[in-house]
């Protein structure tokens, strides 16, 4: 479930953006500060706003609520923040009366909600509000994105798979294709460099010894493969090979109150 929320947030971030400088309004018409940005920044489409332009940004949820970060001042909590429609009459805005004073919240700024065990929400700071009988259920709102034909319902917000699927795939292709090309180029350059280095080592690390008489039965016999002539094997006359050849290197092993 949580993965779906983050996919929804990523989709909104990478959707075709127009008119990024949208203003967010509180239910009473107050203008929110610049840290609150619309979840859907598409020209001509109203949406709820969350604290996206902050050190610990919120996550926009399909329901229109905002999920604050665990690293934020209030930790991970649900909030009803602002909307880009000053009148809050757009179906993409949550209801003006959601978490008003009668519901235990505030209609002039942000309002905190708690998710009850049955999936419903109540306005408050802990689950005690779930027992007071004032709970609400938020369905997902469908917004008009691109050419998708969708409907909207009051105080709710959802993106259908038809609308979000192609957009997410397009983002994956747009980001993945350049990375794949870059990875291929890096692998090819590494291959050429390794091949060149191996050829250089092959030319410079050749070992050659003059063949002598066969060693006696009691002597130690060393067999040396001469680099540069893979088919030739030489015997060293009764002498142990030096630990390091002259001139060569040793062998190597292999929230949210107003401010």
Image (spheres, rainbow, N blue to C red):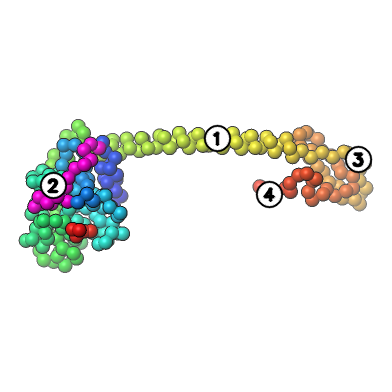
Residue at mark 2 to residue at mark 3: CA–CA distance: 95 Å
In the rendered image, residue 25, in percent from the top left (x then y), is placed at 14, 49
* Neighbourhood count class around disc 2 (C-alpha, 10 Å): few under 14, some 14–19, many 20 upward: many
In the picture, measured across the screen, residue 233 lies left or right of residue 99, that is right
In the picture, measured across the screen, residue 198 lies left or right of residue 132, that is right
Direction top: furthest residue:
147
User: What element does badge 4 sit on?
Assistant: loop
The residue depicted at 79 percent of the width and 46 percent of the height is: 245
N-terminal-most mark, 3 or 4 = 3
Question: Mark 1 near mark 4, Cβ–Cβ under 8 Å?
Answer: no
In the rendered image, residue 126, in percent from the top left (x then y), is placed at 19, 65
Residue at mark 3 to residue at mark 4: CA–CA distance: 30 Å
Q: Is residue 127 above or below residue 81?
A: below
Question: Mark 2 near mark 3, Cβ–Cβ under 8 Å?
Answer: no
Residue picked out by circle 2: 93
N-terminal-most mark, 1 or 4 = 1
In the picture, measured across the screen, residue 224 lies left or right of residue 73, that is right
Residue at mark 1 to residue at mark 3: CA–CA distance: 45 Å
Q: Which numbered tag is attached to residue 212?
A: 3
């Amino acid at each position: 479930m949580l993965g779906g929320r983050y996919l929804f947030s990523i989709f909104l971030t990478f959707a075709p953006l127009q008119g990024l400088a949208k203003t967010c309004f509180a239910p009473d018409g107050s203008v929110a500060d610049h840290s609150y940005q619309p979840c859907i920044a598409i020209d001509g489409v109203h949406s709820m706003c969350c604290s996206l332009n902050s050190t610990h940004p919120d996550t926009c949820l399909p329901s229109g609520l905002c999920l604050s970060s665990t690293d934020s001042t209030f930790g991970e909590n649900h909030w009803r923040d602002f909307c880009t429609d000053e009148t809050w009459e757009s179906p993409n805005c949550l209801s003006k009366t959601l978490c008003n004073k009668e519901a235990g919240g505030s209609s002039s700024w942000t309002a905190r909600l708690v998710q009850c065990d049955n999936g419903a929400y109540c306005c408050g700071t802990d689950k005690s509000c779930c027992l007071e009988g004032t709970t609400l259920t938020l369905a997902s709102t469908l917004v008009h994105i691109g050419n998708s034909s969708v409907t909207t319902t009051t105080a709710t917000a959802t993106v259908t798979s038809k609308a979000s699927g192609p957009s997410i795939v397009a983002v994956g292709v747009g980001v993945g294709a350049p990375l794949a090309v870059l990875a291929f180029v890096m692998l090819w350059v590494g291959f050429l460099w390794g091949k060149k280095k191996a050829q250089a080592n092959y030319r410079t690390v050749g070992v050659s010894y003059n063949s002598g008489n066969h060693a006696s039965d009691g002597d130690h016999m060393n067999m040396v493969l001469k680099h540069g002539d893979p088919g030739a094997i030489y015997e060293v006359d009764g002498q142990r090979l030096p630990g390091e050849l002259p001139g060569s290197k040793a062998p190597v092993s292999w929230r949210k109150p107003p401010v």
